[in-house]
Image (spheres, grey):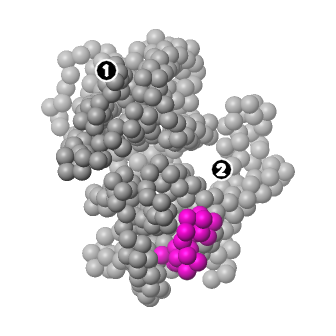
Amino acid sequence: MLKTLRLSFTLRNTYRVNGILYAIKQIPLLKRIIPPSVYQIHGFKIFANILSVIWEVVTIFLGKLLYFLLMILGVGNLYHLPVGTESQAFLHLLFFLSIAGMVINTYMFNPTKDKYYAMILLGMNAREYTLVNYFYAILKVLAGFTLCGFLFGSPRGCSLWQCLLIPFFVAGLKLMTAAYALWDYEKKKTVRNENSLTKYMWGIVAVCLAMAYGLPAFAILVPETVVTGIMCLSAIFGILSLHKILTFRDYRLMYKEMLTSIPLSGIQVDGKVTAKIQQEQSLKNISADQTITSNRKGFEYLNELFIKRHRKILWRSARRLALLATVLTAGCLAAFRFIPELRTGVNGKLMTSLPYFVIVMYFINRGTGFTSALFINCDHSLLTYSFYKQPKFILKLFQIRLREIIKVNLLPAAVIGMGLVILLYASGGTKTPLDYAVLLVSIICMSIFFSVHYLTLYYLLQPYNAGTEIKSGTYQVILTLTYLASYVMIYLKLPILLFGIMTIVFCILYSIGASILVYRFAPKTFRIRL
């Protein structure tokens, strides 16, 4: 077991070090200074190893700290709940978010590169490798949630034993999920994959998020005794689940099926198998209707065919989001009718919380999915032709694609904007009628901004290589900064008129600037990465 743990650490550290060195080489200011032989320089490798070890230690606590600060405390502070319910609200949010996390991340069924290298390529004992690494991940969960439980739970009135119970509750959920997935594999031979959740799983996640964040908005919290009781049961059943995890015998067969049937970024076997697998997966979402055609010419013809064939992945989610926004609006109107006192609170929030919807538009925007599909099923091949990279053609196609992604994102954005206008009016209205128009237009402008932003990043940084892997550290850093900037907006309180006008002006200026940058620099940057 100890030998397996040491080998797995060595393997994980090797490709992590190479990844760090590659990321350093992608930094614009250092790209020309650092030589191509950086992977052979002993000093750089020592530096990367130090960073790797630091990162391993940091991941034990940093992710959990950010989770508590952003997902629980950050959002929890937005609610105006009765005094004395701090511990109840804290446990309420933690309870539902942990159930959602149980579905999304069990650690055992995450198809990562180290598992592929170890069990498929190197032939390590699958059972030993799985158990060693899985229990190491569970120990990190216990350590991280123990610290965060005491650090954030105690100041909010949670008792000592409740704080101590938190890590065992979270670990118990993950153990139960893993045990159930193993049992399900034995019965149905269905392999769970955290990178490809089923509609049923996404439904559970959506319900949990709605319960976590929706109920407190109406001053409804799950009783503290109920939450703590379920937490105790989770810890007990988690311990009982260890029996299935320890006695399961088909780890090699299960992982072989999981790891050889999906794309794993960064793994190259027999040439370009990663690209081939990823394209095969993508083809499942493309219409095979042979009657799809277009009467347009040039790039308009190419774009229309792409949109029609990818309608499933582009428009399906947009329609669902629009439907969800409609249902939520209708639900709020019904709540106004049966609970009239809610109107005042909702009206006050709508008048000052328009910045909050920046993060909403960030999450519903389909920009990254659109650009990924563009590269895999279109640009991946066309970028090998020189005419495709001429400035006038790049700008033309950029404008056509921007128009299309704006149309896709506009559907849910317009429904959300109209819903907010209706709720503002139904909750008491505003003294400034212009607020209604600004509210609607600013929501649409937020959607347009993210559409422009993601497509501009795609053209200026083009992060994919021939194997359809993201190889741009700068691209990933900017995506992270985009999220952080959007999240910070949650805490900004500004009147609708002021923030709305600022949003509209910023969107217009950003769109103009993006078009200029794409025209000037994309002919050099819009290429397949090595």
Residue 96 lies, in percent from the top left, at 40, 64
Q: Dot 1, how many residues are within 10 Å of its Cα: few (below 14), some (14-19), or many (20+)? A: few
In magenta, the rendered stretch is 149-169
Q: Residue at point 56% right, 30% down? A: 461
**Which three-letter amino acid code belongs to the residue tagged 1?**
Pro
The mark nearer the N terminus, 2 or 1, is 2
Residue at image point 55% right, 59% down: 68
Pointer 1 residue: 433
Q: Which of 505 and 394 is in front in this view?
A: 505
Query: Which residue lies at the image location 33% right of the left edge and 41% below the top edge?
Result: 344
Q: What element carries label 1?
A: loop
The reply to whether the magenta stretch includes residue 168 is yes
Looking at the image, residue 382 lies above or below residue 366: above
Q: What element carries label 2?
A: helix
| Any part of residue 253 in sight | no
Give me the C-alpha separation between circle 2 and circle 1. 54 Å
Disc marking residue 19 = 2
